[in-house]
Image (cartoon, grey):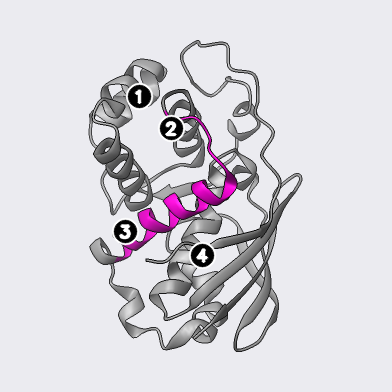
Amino acid sequence: MEPVRIIKAEQPIFSRDSGELVGPDSPGLSHLREFPGKVKGALITSVLEYYQMHHPDFLPRLKNDLCPEYRTQVEEDILPSSWYPEILFAAILKVSLRQIPFGTVEHEVNDAQEIFAHMSRSYHRMFARVVGPTKLISGFFRLWRLYHTIGKALVDEKSRFSTTARLTENPAVLVPRYTEGAIGAICGALAIAGAKNIQISYRRVPPDTVAFEGQWER
């Protein structure tokens, strides 16, 4: 899969990391403690499998860094078809930054694109029915809700080769590496739908929105 070109994006602002076990009261996560949103287990397992494949000691170190509640959930195995709290997924991403330092935004987005390509082969195979990027963008909200219970994917403008859109009403999307993961998934979906030479820009808009613009060729 060819890499995505990032036209413009800001590096995320990282919260303080004390080195303690990561849980619901950790810096950068506490605002999600009462958030009722959930993510599909398939999303979590795909990320865990990707990091474990490239970093063989990832899972043992991950478990050591999670609070007992979150560690138990990971040890009991994440089921692809089940739903889990957004904060658990955000906590996993926060711990991942201890083992795998955040690279450039371009590198992070392209990693996420690979993860999504793997996930789409393993689950649903929904993109076999997609006819081109334009149709994919038209069903953007349905795509988001396959993996998230809360939030909206809104298309402000679209044409045959471009779009302006937002992921909104979900504060988890602003967490470092979560934003880049979401943008990478969008690019991965576009690539599976046949888009070439994908170029994208994005920005975080507190408290709960990521706005982006994309263009591509066929």
Q: Which residue is mark 2?
A: 92
Q: Residues within 10 Å of mark 4 (few under 14, many from 20)?
A: many
Query: Could you tell me residue 93's position as x and y percent?
Result: 47, 35
Q: Is residue 203 visible?
A: yes
Residue type, mark 1 in image: Leu
Q: Which residue is mark 1?
A: 62
Which is more N-terminal, label 4 or label 3?
3
Which is more N-terminal, label 1 or label 4?
1
Instruction: State how far apart marks 2 and 1 are (Cα).
Output: 7 Å
Find numbered disc 3 in the image and state the secondary structure of the residue it sits on.
helix
Query: Could you tell me residue 27's position as x and y percent?
Result: 63, 22
Residue type, mark 4 in image: Ile
Res 153 → quadrant: bottom right
Which is more N-terminal, label 1 or label 2?
1
Query: Could you tell me residue 9's position as x and y percent?
Result: 69, 52
Q: Residues within 10 Å of mark 1 (few under 14, many from 20)?
A: many
Instruction: State how far apart marks 3 and 4 are (Cα).
Output: 13 Å
Q: Which residue is mark 4?
A: 186
Start and end of the magenta stretch?
100-120
The circle on residue 119 is: 3
